[in-house]
Image (cartoon, rainbow, N blue to C red):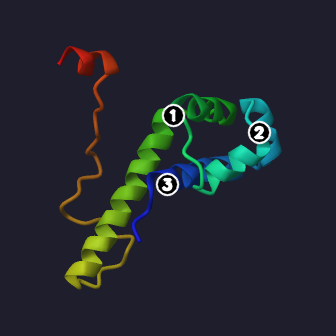
């Protein structure tokens, strides 16, 4: 099964927290988020709102953009592995597919731009 966005976000946040040797309790207190909810976000069971995600990133002192790049790379790796499995190439899962450029970024227009369209 494909990696879900909420799972990739949770994985990225958990890696950031663990790399800092911080507990869920410390980060939840700093972010002003309940311990249980932060745990659910990290496990990929809850979708974090943009405000909540920003608060968690601020508490971890990690730019939101860095988390999103990490998530993008995780999702791209998952797509590449799925494509290789479907094609039967047998290439290792950690080798990026040639069709996906790691420098590719998704640009989401501001809501005001959507309303004017």
Asked whether residue 20 appears in the rendered view, the answer is no
| Mark 1, other Cα within 10 Å: few <14 / some 14–19 / many ≥20 | some
Which quadrant is the C terminus positioned in? top left
Where is residue 33, by image quadrant?
top right
Considering only order in the chain, which callout, 2 or 1, is on the residue closer to the N terminus? 2
Residue tagged 3: 8
Mark closer to the observer (3, 2):
2
**Residue 13 in picture, x, y percent from top left:** 60, 47
- Residue 28 shown left or right of residue 19 in the figure: right
Asked if marks 3 and 2 touch (Cβ < 8 Å), the reply is no
Considering only order in the chain, which callout, 1 or 3, is on the residue closer to the N terminus? 3
What number is the disc on residue 64? 1
Considering only order in the chain, which callout, 2 or 3, is on the residue closer to the N terminus? 3
- Residue 64 shown left or right of residue 57 in the figure: left
| Mark 3, other Cα within 10 Å: few <14 / some 14–19 / many ≥20 | many
**Residue 81 in picture, x, y percent from top left:** 33, 72
| Distance in Å between CA atoms under marks 3 and 2 | 20 Å
Q: Which is nearer the eye, 19 or 109?
A: 109
Q: Which is nearer the eye, 109 or 16?
A: 109
Residue in the image at 24% along x and 79% along y: 86
Asked if marks 3 and 1 touch (Cβ < 8 Å), the reply is no
Relative vertical location of residue 38 with respect to residue 114 in this rendering, above or below: below
Mark closer to the observer (3, 1):
3
What number is the disc on residue 34? 2
Mark closer to the observer (1, 2):
2
């Amino acid at each position: 099964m494909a990696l879900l966005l909420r799972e990739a976000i949770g994985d990225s946040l958990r890696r950031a927290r663990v790399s800092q040797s911080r507990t869920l309790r410390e980060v939840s207190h700093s972010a002003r988020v309940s311990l249980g909810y932060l745990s659910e976000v990290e496990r990929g069971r809850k979708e974090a709102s943009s405000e909540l995600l920003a608060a968690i990133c601020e508490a971890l002192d990690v730019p939101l953009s860095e988390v999103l790049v990490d998530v993008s790379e995780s999702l791209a790796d998952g797509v590449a592995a799925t494509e290789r499995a479907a094609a039967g190439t047998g290439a290792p899962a950690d080798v990026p597919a040639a069709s996906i450029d790691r420098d590719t970024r998704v640009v989401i227009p501001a809501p005001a731009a959507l309303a004017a369209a």
